[in-house]
Image (spheres, rainbow, N blue to C red):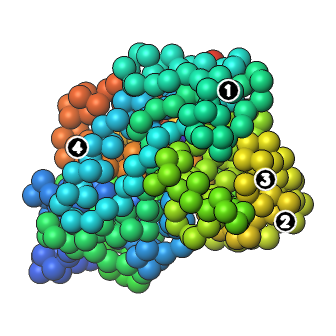
């Protein structure tokens, strides 16, 4: 559950001690910034870029090495799509695609590789029905195909059961995660941001002398920020709970998930590439399965289950979960056999796997809001991206900076995007947003 209690009374003494224990000269020597961003995954790096780009003196802090593999922003591929059963994500994805292209133009290289997007499943699947309704609502150009039309559209490469349908849209493709994070960090530096890694933040208090916040690292460094954005991924709930002295509990559960790569059989290697018109895809049902064209590794296609097992982010198994993995691979074998036939080697199982983290909320929706309480509008927190947030990073970075700098008045222009993503939805309702379709993430 989410809860908040005023922390000023408990922390006021420590604030006064900090202020009185430093001379004026010491306080002047503190690193002083307009915006401090904590967490340098894709969301934090995007926010740092947006802040610096708008002229804010910006500091981006990461507890591990930059571009590390311990969170949710690494690897070689993420899908991008505008097709969602939740209407508010459709708008966000459409705007995000434009911002991805703008960032590519500024950096001078590509991180977004476009393909069609294919969503398919049983014709009566509630998520797929809502997805189609949202395509109509948001004027997303789409085709609805039966099994025969789908097979023809993709030249015999995808086979569907009789009672399934497919939705084909043009906004789809692959994003390169590690390359994307590096792009945002490079652009942030270009616009004057300061970046610091291997620096764990352990405390944050209000700065009673100058306003804003004071952010402290485990190594003893203190930074002053007029505003702060917290985007610490799977660690965000732990960090927020710590800096609020236990007063704020974010309903975010880290999950460890594994993605799998499967060998394409000889003679079919080119058929599954973007160049040959193969799409990024999502299969609705139990379980929800997704994947990308053969792109990041020669002759391998990524096919995985959208889900994972609960974990502590610092104590994960790194994919060593024999029982759970065997079950998931069993589902995937049957699915690949049914959809791709003898074109992909499902018999021998995946040839490679990678471990990643999700940060799940109960309703699978993001959290974007002011931390509130003693911090007022000076601290914005973002997390719980639930395994489907990467594509939205350019827009979310922009929203976070606008909220931090402009406060609630600036947030009004994003009301349609974020009114479903605020912390208040969990007050008196631990499940959050009520939806008319089934959960998509599988817990294993």
List the residue tagged with mark 1: 148
In front: label 2 or label 4: 2
Question: Disc 1 and disc 3: Cα gap in Å?
Answer: 18 Å
In front: label 2 or label 1: 1
Direction from residue 147 to residue 104 in the image, left or right: left
Task: Identify which residue, 212 or 164, lies in the foreground.
Answer: 164
Numbered disc 4: secondary structure: helix
List the residue tagged with mark 2: 348
Task: Identify which residue, 40 or 239, lies in the foreground.
Answer: 40
Direction from residue 64 to residue 341 in the image, left or right: right
List x then y, in percent, for residue 356: 61, 63
Tell me if mark 1 has few (under 14), some (14-19) or many (20+) residues whose alpha carbon lies within 10 angstroms of its own: some
Q: Residue at x 33, y 43 (%)?
A: 97
List the residue tagged with mark 4: 402
Res. 105 visible in picture: yes
Q: Please tell me whether residue 236 is drawn above or below residue 316 in the rendered image.
A: above
């Amino acid at each position: 559950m989410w809860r908040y209690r005023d922390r000023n009374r408990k922390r006021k003494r420590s604030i006064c001690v900090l202020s009185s224990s430093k001379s004026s000269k010491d306080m002047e020597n503190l690193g002083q910034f307009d915006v401090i961003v904590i967490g340098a995954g894709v969301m934090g790096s995007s926010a740092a870029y947006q802040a610096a780009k708008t002229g804010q003196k910006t500091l981006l802090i990461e507890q591990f090495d930059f571009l590390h593999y311990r969170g949710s922003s690494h690897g070689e591929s993420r899908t991008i799509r505008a097709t969602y059963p939740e209407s508010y994500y459709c708008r966000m994805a459409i705007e995000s695609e434009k911002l991805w292209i703008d960032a590519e133009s500024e950096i001078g290289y590509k991180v977004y590789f476009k393909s069609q997007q294919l969503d398919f499943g049983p014709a009566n699947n509630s998520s797929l029905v809502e997805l189609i309704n949202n395509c109509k609502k948001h004027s997303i150009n789409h085709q609805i195909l039966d099994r025969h039309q789908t097979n023809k559209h993709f030249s015999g490469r995808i086979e569907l059961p009789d009672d399934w349908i497919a939705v084909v849209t043009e906004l789809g493709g692959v994003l390169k995660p590690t390359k994307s994070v590096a792009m945002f960090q490079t652009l942030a530096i270009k616009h004057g941001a300061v970046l610091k890694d291997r620096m764990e933040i352990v405390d944050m208090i209000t700065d009673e002398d100058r306003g804003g916040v004071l952010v402290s690292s485990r190594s003893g460094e203190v930074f002053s920020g007029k505003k702060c954005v917290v985007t610490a991924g799977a660690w965000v709930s732990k960090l927020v709970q710590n800096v609020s002295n236990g007063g704020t509990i974010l309903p975010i559960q880290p999950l460890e998930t594994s993605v799998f790569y499967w060998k394409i059989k000889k003679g079919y290697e080119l058929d599954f590439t973007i160049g040959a018109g193969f799409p990024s895809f999502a299969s609705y049902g139990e379980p929800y399965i997704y994947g990308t064209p053969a792109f990041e590794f020669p002759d391998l296609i990524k096919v995985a289950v959208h889900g994972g097992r609960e974990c502590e982010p610092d104590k994960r198994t790194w994919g060593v979960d024999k029982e759970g993995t065997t079950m998931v691979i069993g589902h995937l074998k049957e699915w690949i056999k049914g959809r791709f036939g003898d074109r992909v080697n499902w018999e021998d199982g995946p040839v490679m796997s990678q471990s990643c983290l999700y940060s799940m909320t109960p309703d699978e929706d993001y959290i974007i809001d002011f931390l509130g309480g003693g911090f007022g509008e000076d601290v914005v927190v973002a997390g719980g991206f639930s395994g489907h947030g990467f594509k939205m990073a350019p827009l979310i970075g922009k929203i976070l900076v606008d909220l931090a700098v402009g406060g609630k008045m600036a947030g009004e222009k994003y009301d349609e995007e974020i009114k479903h993503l605020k912390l208040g939805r969990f007050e008196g309702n631990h499940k959050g947003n009520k939806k008319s379709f089934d959960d998509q993430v599988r817990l294993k």
